[in-house]
Amino acid sequence: MVGAFIAATLLAEALGAINLGTALAFGQIAFLIAAAFVILRR
């Protein structure tokens, strides 16, 4: 899940996010999706 957060943050930065806060917001969304996926798989 942490990997999803880091990957989404770095991807958003690479694709031209306005600032780091915006990129981190995308990271949080990816973390939430990963957490939901882990919870729902069980």
Image (spheres, rainbow, N blue to C red):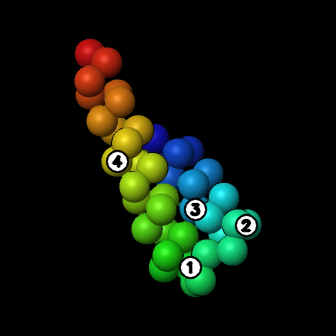
Q: Quadrant of the N terminus?
A: top left
The label on residue 9 is 3
Q: Are marks 1 and 4 in contact (CB under 8 Å)?
A: no
Tell me the CA gap for discs 2 and 1: 11 Å
Residue designated by label 2:
14
Q: Earlier in the sequence, mark 3 or mark 1?
A: 3
Q: Are marks 3 and 2 in contact (CB under 8 Å)?
A: no
Tell me the CA gap for discs 2 and 4: 21 Å
- Neighbours of disc 4 within 10 Å: few (<14), some (14-19), many (20+): some
Q: Are marks 3 and 1 in contact (CB under 8 Å)?
A: no
- Neighbours of disc 3 within 10 Å: few (<14), some (14-19), many (20+): many
Residue designated by label 1:
20
Q: Earlier in the sequence, mark 3 or mark 4?
A: 3
Disc tally is 4
Q: Earlier in the sequence, mark 2 or mark 4?
A: 2
Q: Nearer the viewer, mark 2 or mark 1?
A: 2
Question: The residue under label 3 is which amino acid type?
Answer: Thr
Question: The residue under label 4 is which amino acid type?
Answer: Leu
Question: The residue under label 1 is which amino acid type?
Answer: Leu
Residue designated by label 4:
32
Q: Earlier in the sequence, mark 2 or mark 1?
A: 2
- Neighbours of disc 2 within 10 Å: few (<14), some (14-19), many (20+): few
> SS class of the residue under badge 2?
helix
> SS class of the residue under badge 4?
helix
Task: Specify the farthest residue to the right.
Answer: 14
Q: Is residue 34 above or below residue 39?
A: below
